[in-house]
Amino acid sequence: MHKQGYWGYIFTLPFIVNLLVFVLFPIVFSAYIAFTQWDLFNAPRWVGLDNWIQTLTDPPFWISIRNVMVFSLIFVPLQTVFAFIIAYLLNQSIRGKSLFRLFYFMPVVTPWIAGGILWVWLYNYRFGLINWTLDSIGITPIHWLDNKHWWVVIASVAIANVWKGIGSSMILLLAGMQNVPKEMLEAAAIDGASRWVRLTRIIFPLVSPMVYMVMILSTIASFQAFDVFLGMFGSITAGIPEQHMVTNLIIYRDAFLFFKMGPASAMAWLLFVIILSITLFQRYFEKRWVHYD
Amino acid sequence: MKNKAKVVMMMSLSAVLLSACTLSNSGSGSAPGGSGDGETVRITLGLPGGYDVTNKEIIDGFIAAHPNIEVDIQEAPWGDFTNRIATQIAGNTMPDLWFQENAVILGYGQRGVAEDLAPYIERDLTTDDYIDTLFAAQTPEGQVWGVPHGANPIALAYNKTIFEEGGVALPTDEWTFENLIEAAKQLTQTDANGNTEVFGFIGSSSITQGWFPWIKQAGGMVLDETLTESRFDDPNTIAGLQQLRDGIADGYFMDGDSITAYGGELPAFGSGKSAMFFLQYSTQVTMNNDFPDTDWDVVKIPRSVDGERYVPTVSNSWLISSRASQEAKDASWEFLKYYLGDEAQAILAESGSALPVKQSALALLEDSQTKPANKLAFTDGIAEGGVTLDENASWNEWRIAVQQIVNEIVKGNVTPEAGALDIHKRVQDILDSQS
């Protein structure tokens, strides 16, 4: 090996050690403890497939998967569409553009502990602004976060999550739009293309890789939803109804409140497989609408 | 060769850096010889909530009185501490001595993390000097996994002004829950549009101030005496939940939306939005600080249908790590003896943050000048009917399972009967899985 090669290894050694110790080891270790009974305090005991069978036959796990899927189905399209529209509008020549960008990005840097309080207030059945508005225009107020129908609750949380996440998606799409050659748009305009045609035939195809990335990132984030649900419902110990639980909350609860590391690890791996499958599914359809040329 | 030496050096440096990132368990690092021969012993003391929860005067007093014991304090906000402690135990870097919720301590005991304090208590304490809460962390088998940091019973707090304006007689220690419900109906005030301005009582959905006392007063049970069987299928248990739900549904108990709007249960009571409230002893400090002008007092929790009194009492418990060295265990027990002694218990009584468990310190409360005037409602209440929240090693797990469904019951999304039967099945499954 060349002398230069040694130096390369030496300089990357801290990162390699970090990767091995804090990333690779926990992944391998969690795969191991998924086959054991381990309470954190005593030595793990091998139980074979028990944790996997228990998880796969546990109704609350499937309820949580159903919830993250519905959450994702509402959150991802809403966030992508609204982020695209806002990015498009903010890419125009308008006054106070920077100020608008700042406003839309502010929720991203707002912690969920504060965002949760805000949205819990907005959704309050008796005193919330949303129900007050509905009531004042003659619409019956809605139980947003304590509805009998679980999907209303999940949709309410998804909408709050759109508010929080739209800023970062908007920034990505805006960056993509700013790379669209002005000459191309001007040439299309001279040839008589309307705004709609320029948007759908030029801007969207050119920005489609960014849209695709936003969708992938949003999907992964939605399946990993955790803090948004804690922000909206308070702590796990306060008793978030099972019908509103998501998988990451159950994993955290089982691991660190109930000290059941084995089932929690099995659940985490199953969630990983589901996220991977959905990402591959999205990738399968990528070629049909994403343009890299 | 020279390059290989550099690689080895860099790897060694990385290893040193990594090891520096981990915490060390100072408890096992006590000086040989222990405290008995005058050498210094070092212990690590975990204080969740820091000095907001544990009086600094007590810690300082212990340090001053025990020059041969060095105390390293690990303090952190409550949530941070409790989130971290499990991983500290897993990594064997936990303090030698700390406190947490009593139910959590019971779980630690079952998993071999806590030292059995029964022999220490038998050797060094006169148990008659203490109230029964001293043994809150005792198992049916006789192990004692911790001793109380303090006791927190509940009492019925009432707003005198609202009672006087409503022309309703003030509560007494002889009240039953029926009296409470009737008074709540009479004291609920609505405006011209039918919106409630003052509620009679706060319909808490929490265990201590909500479903547990409501179940007990109706003659129901949560678990049986052995703490291994669910009793949520008991008709009296369901009746208790039904009464709590009825109060909220009929509008004389404050509902969850209103509690949120008023900033929580205590602010709702303190600001005069509710006439009555089950107040936990420790919250009197906040009540007096935040609402000094509110005219209020307490009486004992009303009697149940069978004439008995059940006073739910929450306690946090100190535990000594079973993995600490013997010297550190002995030094930690010295701290607990000091904590349970007259001087420290008097400081605890003075602070108002929890009831002391030593009888002599409880007597000091009679001379207290702070509100509530009738502190005997807590001390006599706990003596007459103090009960734990049916805590066992799986309490954290079954309590959350119950809470999930009770939240739906109080909102009216599930009927008390259907909800209780669902709870019964889940709780029994959890209890069975532990046995």
Image (tube, coloured by chain):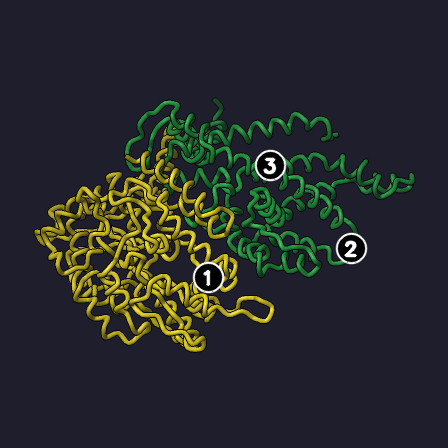
Chain colours: A green, B yellow
Amino acid at dot 3 = Thr
Residue A285 visible in the picture? yes
Question: From what the image shows, is residue A12 above or below residue B225?
Answer: above
Q: Which mark is residue B253?
A: 1
Q: Amino acid at mark 1?
A: Phe
Q: Tell me residue B138's x, y (percent).
A: 21, 47
Please, what secondary structure does the residue beneath circle 2 have? loop
List the residue tagged with mark 2.
A94
Quadrant location, the N terminus of chain B:
top left
Residue nearest the viewer, comparing A131 with A213: A131
Q: Position of residue A163 (x, y in %)?
A: 62, 50
Question: Disc 1 vs disc 3: which is toward the camera?
Answer: 1
In the rendered view, tell whether residue B243 sits above or below residue B86: below
The kind of secondary structure element at disc 3 is helix
Q: Residue at x 26, y 38 (%)?
A: B111
Report the residue marked by disc 3.
Answer: A219
